[in-house]
Each structure stands twice: as C-alpha cells, then as structure tokens.
Amino acid sequence: MKTSLPYSRREFMQGSAALAGLLLLGQRAWGATAAPRTMHPYPNKVTWGAGSLKLGRRARLAVARDCEAGVVALLKETWRQFTFGAVELEVTQDAALKAGQFVLGTARPPELETQATYALRVAAEGVAVTAVDNASLRYAWFTLLQLLQPSDAAGALEFSVPHVEIQDWPALKFRGLHLCIFHETTPLMIEKALRLAAFLKFNHVVLEFWGMLRLDALKELSWPDAWSKRDARKLLDAARGMGLEIIPMFNCWGHATACRIKHGRHVVLDQNPQLAPLFEPDGWTWCLTNPRTQALLRKVCDELCEFAGPGQYFHIGCDEAYSHATCDRCRPGDRVKLFTDHVNVLAEYLEQRNRRAIMWGDPLLERGKWPAGFEANGTPDLPTHQAFARLSRKIVIADWHYGVTQGDVPTLKFFREQGFETLACPWNSPANIRTLAKAAAANQGGLLMTTWHHLAQSIPTLPYAAACAWSQDQAALGMRQMEGSLSRAATAALLRKLAPAGGRFERAGWNPFEQPWETD
C-alpha cells in the first residue's frame, strides 16, 4: 500500500497559493465587483446574462422520445433533491426534439459549437439543452441543477435560474476515481463517493474490494462478513444510473494479501493456511508458476467482469510485488519473463472478454532513472523494467506518482512515446492532482484519482480533481472556488442534496466523528 500521508490544511493552502498568479486571471474573468457563481466543475465557455428565470410551483420538462427511462428517472430524482421537493417536475416526450435535447418552457435548443459536447441556454423563454449523447445530457443537467437559486422573499420557497449561455466539453476524456472497500469501509461512504463523482462529471470508477466481496471462485478470498454481491449491486446500479462505468479490479500479482501489509493480515491464509502454495513464501505475492494460481486468477476475473456489468476495462493491479518469484519453484526460472508472460497472457484473456487491462506503471520504470518523487520499482534485484519492450501495447498504464507536485511528468511522455495509453494517477494533495492532470492533458491521457485508505480525507478533494480533469483553463474557470476550506464546503453542499442525511448525525458529512483531525 502507498505510504503517502493525507493532505494537511497547510498543504491544501500551499496548493492553492501555487495558483496565485493565475487566479488574477480568474478574477478578471469574473469581473472585479461580482463574486463567481459556484459550479463544479466550472464550464469551459460561459456567457452570463443580466436577468433570471423564475420557476413556479410546477415545471414541465420536455425530452426526446428516445430518451432512456433511466435518464428520465435520474432527472426526476435529482430535481427533487435540488429543489427540496418545492417544485414539481413533470417530464413529457416531444417528437420535435432530437436525441440529446431537452426543454423547460418554450426555449429553443441551442446549436453546439465545434468542440462542445453540450450546450445550455437559460433565457426568459426557459431552459434548453443540446447534447451529443446521454452522458453529455446528464452533465448538462448537473450543471443546470447547480444554477438553481433558492429564495424565500415571498414567504415561501421559490427558485430562479440566472440567464446564461454555456458551451462545454471535457479537457480529459477519461476521468476516473479509484475506490477501495476495506473491512471498515461503510456502504454509505462508497455511495456518497460514487454519487458525488458522477455529479462532478467523472465517467469511470475503479472498485477494488480488499477481501470485502464474497466470491464464488474461492470463499477464502473474502472475510466472512464481506459484502454480498446482492448488496454491492445496489451501489453499482446507483453508480451506473448516474452515468459511471464500473471498472472491476483485482490484484493479480502483488498485494495478494488483500490487506494492508502494515497491519499483517492475509485474507486467505488467516482463514486457511493450507492454501499457502498459491503464494510466494511471505504471502505478499501470487505464485505465478502454480497452475492453480493462474486458474484462480482467471476465475476471479471472469466473476468480477460479470458482477460489474458492461464495461471496457479491468484493472489487474501489478504494483509493489517485492517478493516476486522467491519460492523454490519460481526462483530457477527467468523472473522477468515470468512477469511479462503473466501480464501479457492475462491481458489477452481479458481482451477475449472485451476488456482492456489496466496496470500500475511502477514495475516498468527503472529506479534511479527518474527524478526524486517518482515511483519506480524496477531494480537490479527485481529488473521488471526489462519487460517493458515485450509488454502488450493494448495494456493501459496507470502512472501513479503521489510526491510530484510541480513541473513536468516525464514518465507519462515516456509511456506514450513507447506506444502505451496512460492514466495519470494522483492522490489527495491539490498540487499533486493539478500537476498530474495538466500532464495528462499534455500527453493525451486520462486521470485516475486514487483515494486508498483515506477516503474520508479524499472526498473533499473531488471537486478540485473534477475541475482539473474537466476545465481546460483552471485559473479562469473556477479553481478559485477550491481555495482552502471552500472545497470542503462545496463538497458538503452537494452531498446534502445527493445523499441526504435525513437529520441523522451518522449519515451526515464524511467522517464518523466530529472532533477534527486537523485544525480548521
């Protein structure tokens, strides 16, 4: 498991201070006298009008005839959440509307500019949207919901929407979030992370169950009190309903304990020590020369693919396999070839199931070749970096570097020049997120935000990460809204609507306690 510490308030402020020069541009873009309206992530092209559209107690939304039932259900549910049930929404089908269009009132759907994936217009006539697909239609809707302004000036709750024209598109096509389910992780925390990520226009989520999903392939792969697939599917269904693609993950090389090494547990061997031959002697790494191991890994991949539902990817892990090929059966052979063949064959196996393998990039980087702060685990004792030339280019490399907070990311360029598609993977330091997102855009890659064992501390960084992955000009398009505690406040405001606490302390926020872990 990675050893980086959660961000501190000082680190968060330092990350924001690094943007200080660019923030002047943001102030000029918003005007010297008016504070910016809050939207996360901030759209790429916004033209504000002078007036506002006042909503009545009922609103009629017209959608195209081919609008999917799941999308309509999402529109209704989120509208109710963001208007607190004060404005009833009636959804009708209109044959005159094209796919990807909706209208509230009598407004005409706007034209899309060249690179835009959705256009939104609010005027006196109403609200209208044109989007290229269902995903972009959802994103337009999520933007609209954030424009709703409540008022009680007339003695009752009312809502208005400012006049605006928006043309919007993502800076990065792949905007992913990696979530771990540990023994102490609650379904509510995962639900909040999933709903928030989808609303912030992430489009992929990697789900890694650390011994916490009951698998038919081998019962000892999960603890006795692990989640059932039936219970877990409720969260997956909610995630898919909001537009997230589920990427299943299983560590197919290192991290074979399915537990953090610092606490010494092993999900399999602490339940059944007789299964020791599946692993290297210390249990940390799978034994790749054991046919039973290889067969088991494939059964798990098949099972998780079926469980996750339709999708393009499968994350096979493959980081930090420090005890690779240390048993008497593995040691006499070519350790690099053993690793290479394992990854290539597994990637081909997944390809036959219409999935592309994603793997961590650290074993493919030679230690000492890269600047300080870059993770590289190819060493003279374990020269896995020598497998680089023989590895299938159909594999997507997830390039994680949690200590890189400024400058270029040469590893992304290296992988890209050698024919790999890449995902830049930051953790929860704002400067780290912004640096890797900028490098991902420069190298035509994607972003995979990680959370690991600090989900509670990572959730408030999601609006920041979303802005980095979506907004092309972070300075002028909303990064100022992410300064210091504003990121936490924005996160809390969204979660109160997306996952209401119902007045219960234990369902509110993202920590199970109120005593702060750092000074506010």
Image (tube, grey):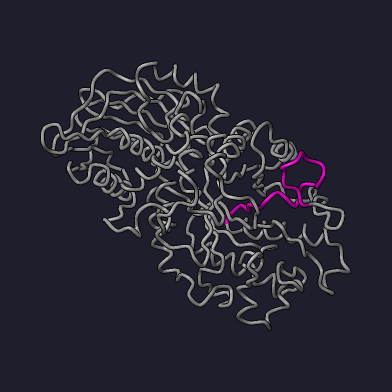
User: What residue is at 63 percent from the left and 52 percent from the top?
Assistant: 358
User: What residue is at 82 percent from the left and 70 percent from the top?
Assistant: 330
Identify the residue at the far left of this view: 155
Q: Which residues are magenta?
A: 354-377
Q: Is residue 268 above or below residue 486?
A: below
Q: Is residue 358 magenta?
A: yes
Q: Is residue 113 above or below residue 465?
A: above
Percent coordinates x, y for residue 488 in the rendering: 43, 42
Magenta highlight: main SS: loop
State the quadrant of the C terminus. Answer: top left
State the quadrant of the N terminus. Answer: bottom right
Residue 152 image-quadrant placement: top left
User: What residue is at 19 percent from the left and 42 percent from the top?
Assistant: 89
Q: Is residue 163 above or below residue 104?
A: above
Identify the residue at the far right of this view: 332
Q: How many numbered circles are shown?
A: 0
Percent coordinates x, y for residue 41 in the rendering: 43, 35
Residue 316 in the figure: left or right of residue 325: left
- The foreground one among 490 and 14 is 14
Q: Is residue 45 magenta?
A: no
User: What residue is at 37 percent from the left and 28 percent from the top?
Assistant: 119
Percent coordinates x, y for residue 464 in the rendering: 49, 38
